[in-house]
Image (cartoon, rainbow, N blue to C red):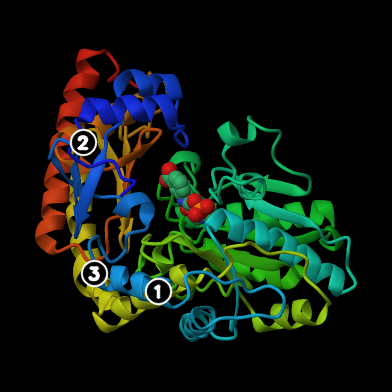
Amino acid sequence: MTQIANHLPTAELQALDAAHHMHPFTHGDALAEKGARIITRARGAVLTDSDGKEYLDGMAGLWCVNIGYGRDELAEAAARQMRELPYYNTFFQTSHVPAIALAARLAELAPEGMNHVFFAGSGSEANDTNIRMVRHYWAAMGKPGKTVIVARHNAYHGSTMGGASLGGMSAMHAQGGLPIPDVVHIGQPFWYGEGGDMDPQEFGIMRARELETKIDELGAGRVAAFIAEPIQGAGGVIIPPESYWPEIRRICDERGILLIADEVICGFGRTGDWFASTALGIRPDIITIAKGVTSGYQPLGGSIVRDSVARVVNAAGEFNHGYTYSAHPVAAAVALENLRIIDEEGVLAHVRDVAAPHLADRWAGLGAHPMVDDARSYGMLAGLQLTPDKAARAPFAAEAGAVGLICRERCFENGLVMRHVGDRMIVSPPLIMSPAEIDTLADRAWTAIEETCSIARERGLFSAA
Ligand code: PXG
């Protein structure tokens, strides 16, 4: 087999990795000097590295391993499909059984009136599809001037030219000449960081009305769509005030623009529903999916499209768009098996009745730490803010993210994967976590925060900016 055995010494694996492998979102030289952490296997919610150390995976990989690691059923589904039909495309008036079955199943699960799916290989690709589809839709409606897509600062919608343009990450825009034309950004509903003395609900309304102002400034005849994550993930698990989404929906309806809910993270049980749009009352025209649709066992993304939009697109001649791996049969077969498991094993009920309430309780407990504020969760998404001064909601007198990075490293040392975004700490655990594992997660997080606090004091970082 052309495979490097797991028992190759870690240092040798690290040297090969440094010599040949360019990592995403990574400073290559800095990593080469340090050596990558190499994960060799995983079961349930626990990862094992090449030295045999175990970590509780608070991130479900990269927000995706919803049913946990090591499910043989998904391996079997992939193997079965590879033997039957490992690849075929869905171009040239052709289809195949896994694509048909998955599209039909997603139509069943999706909110009312959303019965059409365009498949991609990832969330980024799906959002690129969305840009092209909404512009094509409006052109077909006789409004070719409606091309602008409004998105939000600090959003994450992927890393392709289109996805990164929709995203509001300034560090990404700074590389490669982004955003592409006709993508504009408005403020995010991040009350803790940006709400000042305003009431959170008023702040939610104010941020939603930035959409109205932007549309009116550009003219509704120019605006195609608004895209947003129901709850921002990579931006720091930002849960919007309840006032936000209903106001956004009103504005989209009144101004006649499409609403794209990017549920790449929120979908498939993460919030306790199949889609967060349902609980938050978003009523999207397009839903972006990826990640949890296969629990990350295979790369698959897509756009679930409202019937009224799909009808126009389907009638408008050829949509000159698609990917070699659109509806890849192996990925689709794995997705179907993953959705079966979520359904038949009651994963949504587990999230709603057991895991999410327990996480909410234990996570809120972290808020008792003197360096922790805004410790909140929604479903199996949780974020907290590290701060030297809770009353003032102040940042540290250090480069943003310096303390967060220390905390992330302390988490790894303590056997927990927890990510940092600036000085926010975030988790998105596998949905199948037991209460005992959630206890372990919270206990290790507390220990790591304690250690971070001591280190920050020692290094003189524990003062407000
Ligand atoms: N939309 C959202 C909301 C996402 O979170 C994408 C689109 C892009 O999906 P693909 O499959 O193209 O990666 C994502 C991906 C992080 C991190 O550091 C988050 C993502 C990807 C990589 C890193 O939190 N989310």
Question: Depth-wise, is mark 3 or mark 2 nearer the camera?
Answer: 3
Numbered tag placed on residue 28 in the rendering: none
Q: Position of residue 344 (x, y in %)?
A: 27, 83
Task: Name the one closer to the observer, 24 or 193.
Answer: 24
The residue where tag 1 is placed is 83
Residue 392 is at least partly visible in this image: yes
Mark 2: secondary structure: helix
The reply to whether dot 3 and dot 2 touch (C-beta < 8 Å) is no
Q: Is residue 304 left or right of residue 130?
A: left
* Quadrant in the picture for residue 250: bottom right
Numbered tag placed on residue 412 in the rendering: 2
Q: Amino acid at mark 3?
A: Asp
Numbered tag placed on residue 72 in the rendering: 3
Sequence-wise, which precedes: disc 1 or disc 3? Answer: 3
Q: Position of residue 99 (x, y in %)?
A: 53, 78
Query: Which residue sits at x=59%, y=85%?
Result: 113
Q: CA distance from mark 1 to mark 3?
A: 16 Å
Query: Which residue sits at x=79%, y=59%?
Result: 223
Residue 108 sits above or below residue 294 on the image: below
Q: Is residue 140 left or right of residue 11?
A: right
Mark 3: secondary structure: helix
Q: Amino acid at mark 2?
A: Phe
Q: CA distance from mark 3 to mark 2?
A: 27 Å
* Quadrant in the picture for residue 266: bottom left
The reply to whether dot 1 and dot 3 touch (C-beta < 8 Å) is no
Mark 1: secondary structure: helix
Q: Amino acid at mark 1?
A: Arg
Q: Is mark 2 within 8 Å of ligand 1?
A: no
Query: Which residue sits at x=67%, y=33%?
Result: 176
Q: Position of residue 178 (x, y in %)?
A: 69, 38
Query: Which residue sits at x=40%, y=50%?
Result: 237
